[in-house]
Image: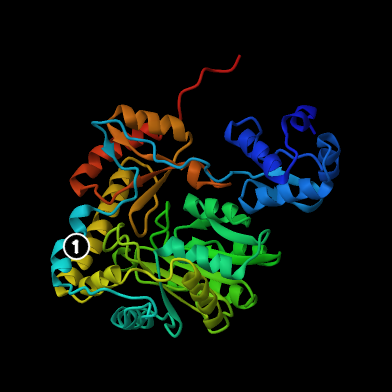
Amino acid sequence: MPGDLLDLIAGERAGAISASVEALVEADRVAPGTALPPVRRLARHLGVSPTTVAAAYRDLQLRGLVTASGRRGTRIASRPPPLQRGQTPVPEGLRDLTTGNPDIDLLPDLSLALQSLQPRQRLYGEPAHNQTLRQLAAADLAGEGVPPDSLLVVGGALDGIERALVARLRPGDRVAVEDPGYPVIHDLLLTLGLVPEPLPVDDRGYLPEALEAALRGPLAAVIGTPRAQNPSGAALDEQRARELRGLLDARGDVLVIEDDHAGPVAGTPLASLWSTARERWAFMRSVSKSLGPDLRLGVMAGDSQTISRVENRQQLGAGWVSHLLQGLVVALWTDVEVERLLQRAAEAYTERRSALIHALAEHGVAAHGRSGFNVWIPVPDEQAAVRRLLDAGWAVAPGERFRHHSPPGIRVSVGSLLPAEAPRLARALALSAERPARTRSA
């Protein structure tokens, strides 16, 4: 262990010690994977009790800054959660394909739905859920093979995922995540003190052999995206879902969380991982991609115990999701014109993905995107590809923040990409994806 790290950590109380380590991480003065000093050695160096240092390390682990690995000791997390979050602004004049947003022209007009509402004041002690919303959601889920017997309204898909994890897991538990996958999920796990276990995905979701291997170990949960996977656009089909269900059925104690964030605009039918053998499960469906990101509302189905724990915890905090939002979603879900719009949106996103993938194929460039809002393009050098595209007037997302062990790539969000733009973007992408020229060796 580097002796200077021992000298860099300071503090007489647990809070001060953990703050000292956090400051080192924030300043990039300690690399991911670096081992922290053993508890007793640091305690002697600081002149405090081992209990104080252990409490500091436990606090760091709960906030996802370090991981405890038994004999390997406590180490800086491989990718600590962001201490300051914010999206890098795209320079003016560039075509922004970085966000993953839906097309605003394919979202319903909220003003019309708001005019149809007849809101009233709600008081403490009234039912937390709009019963019409519950009935509509239950019928929708049941029609796609997801049991709606235990149902809860939450503040979006990520809110539900966090609540399910807190209800069922403990710090240090291992959770399978998609690789490449949505980085916020990874950051959330670290913040909760959980250990992400990245597993590879292809166009049809988790690779069965990778999940099978992970299930042989102490895996506590699996988080999966049944369709519109971010960033790859992967979507489970029934054959792959059946394979994965067979593996998961042997471990009924594993919590299975599905994030169906795109729902009706994903562009592919739902193939769920739910089965009758599942003891612990949660299924999220958000309205953010279909009705608008500012509608912070999702529906969560699950086993009765998980839903009960989540609901009890919700009542102690937020209490309920605003009835104004719930009523607005009901108005949108029961509007025939909105139903037609969602169908057009699903068709438009499919057309946009397909146009780009086919245009890239004409240049010999492989790309992935069976569903959703994104196309994933493998490249040999992410940064070089992103820079070349910027020079050509296109802003795309480098794949590094989505990846753990998977090969490099870039993510192109096609939510607002018109099919007529695809050939020009494909030409720029084909040039940007070429391996940079290098000088010959001596």
Decide if residue 175 is on the left or right side of residue 82. right
Percent of width and height locating residue 194: 63, 57
User: Which amino acid, by three-letter code, is at mark 1?
Assistant: Pro
Under tag 1, what secondary structure? loop
Q: Which residue is mark 1?
A: 108
Which residue is drawn at the image coordinates 21% and 59% (left, top)?
107
| Residue count near mark 1 (Cα–Cα under 10 Å), binned few <14, some 14–19, many ≥20 | some
Q: Nearer the viewer, residue 251 or 132?
A: 132
x and y percent of residue 247 in the render? 60, 73
User: Can residue 441 be seen from the camera position used here?
Assistant: yes
Q: How is the image coloured?
A: rainbow
Q: Residue 352: x percent and y percent?
A: 25, 52
The one of 221 and 8 positioned closer to us in this rendering: 8
For the question of whether residue 33 can be seen, the reply is no
Question: Is residue 168 placed above or below 369 in the rendered structure?
Answer: below
Placement of the N terminus among the 4 image quadrants? top right
Residue 155 percent coordinates (x, y): 39, 65
**In-image side of 157 versus 392 (left or right):** right
Residue at (54, 18) in percent of width and height: 440
Q: Residue at x 61, y 50 (%)?
A: 64
The residue at the point 38 percent across, 42 percent down is: 365
Q: Nearer the viewer, residue 260 or 377?
A: 260
Q: Is residue 173 left or right of residue 38?
A: left
